[in-house]
Image: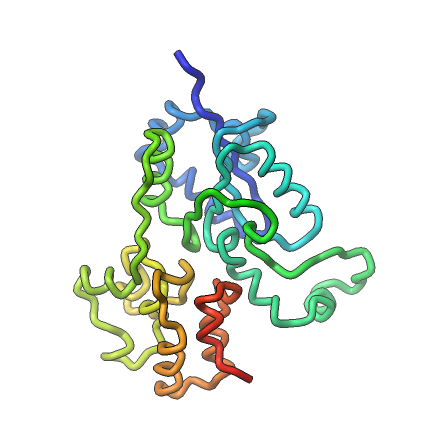
Amino acid sequence: MSAKPKVAIYKMSSCAGCQLEFLNLEPVLLDILGLVDLSYFVMARRDCEPGPYDIGFVEGAITCHEEIEKLKKARCDCKTLVALGSCAAFGGIPSMKDWTPERVVEERVYPNTSILSSVKAMPISEYVKVDAVLKGCPVSRDELVEFIKGALLGIRPYLRPHSVCVECKLNENSCLIETMREPCMGPVTSAGCDALCPGLGRTCNGCRGPANDANSASLARTFAELNLQPKDVARKFRKFAGLTEEFSKGVPSA
């Protein structure tokens, strides 16, 4: 009998919400543990096993030199490396600091910045090759299971390329832009969340990053027609994935 694939879960600068979703897979967690060896998972294991690993999931943005070294070591140790969630995929919430000088960011938190070595918050693809991306804040449990199943079966998992608007239509949600004149990021944001926020009457914040063929410039003009100031439009596009080329097109020119 062949050995089970070895899996590692790494944490960089993040809230740990995406790796927590592994533990929230209660209905299928024992089934998954029967098929893979969760070798490295600091949140869930007292003693972690050394690599190499078959699959590595990396949560969090890269915000310091120590994390760059840790990430490159993970890349060497893992056959397949996966960006787990929006921070790892796009920079996420930590990347909101990237439009402020790093010195100013440090001084807002620490009285003595001379001992710090922070860098702009970046997705892990800035430093290493990434084999797959699981979007979301936190990552979708359904997509997480779909990816694990696909990896075990050697098939490509189905990760939705269309926008959240498609899911709203499938769920027969009212369009918040049309009916409530609210600035919703759904038209340009990648689906996979089942339109969770719009389904609860809240606008999409763009946490899953850009959908295929996202027309961010057009949506930015719509936001302006809703009387959003340019700085507020910029914040909408920079909240989770402002470093992406697609969402940067939605940021008004200075």
Q: Is 92 displayed left or right of 217 in the figure?
A: right
Task: Pick the quarter of the image with the C terminus.
Answer: bottom right
Residue toward you, 218 or 180: 218
Q: Could you say where residue 208 lies in the image, as x and y percent from the top left?
A: 40, 58
Q: As rendered, which of 185 and 159 lies closer to the eye?
A: 159
Q: Residue at x 33, y 27 (%)?
A: 31
Q: Is residue 7 visible?
A: yes
In the image, residue 238 sits, relative to residue 121, either above or below, namely below
**Residue 83: % across, % down:** 49, 46
Q: Quadrant of the N terminus?
A: top left
Quadrant hosting residue 226: bottom left
Note whether 182 is above or below 31 in the view shown.
below
Of residues 114 and 52, the one nearer the viewer is 52
Question: Residue 165 placed where, x, y %?
Answer: 27, 65
Is residue 47 shown to the viewer in this render? no
Q: How is the image coloured?
A: rainbow
Residue occupying the point 34% across, 72% down: 184
Task: Where is residue 49? Give x, y as percent.
Answer: 58, 25
| Residue 160 higher or lower than 205, as above or below | above
- Please tell me which residue is depicted at 24% across the width and 73% down the height of the picture: 175
For the image shown, how many numbered marks are present on the structure?
A: 0
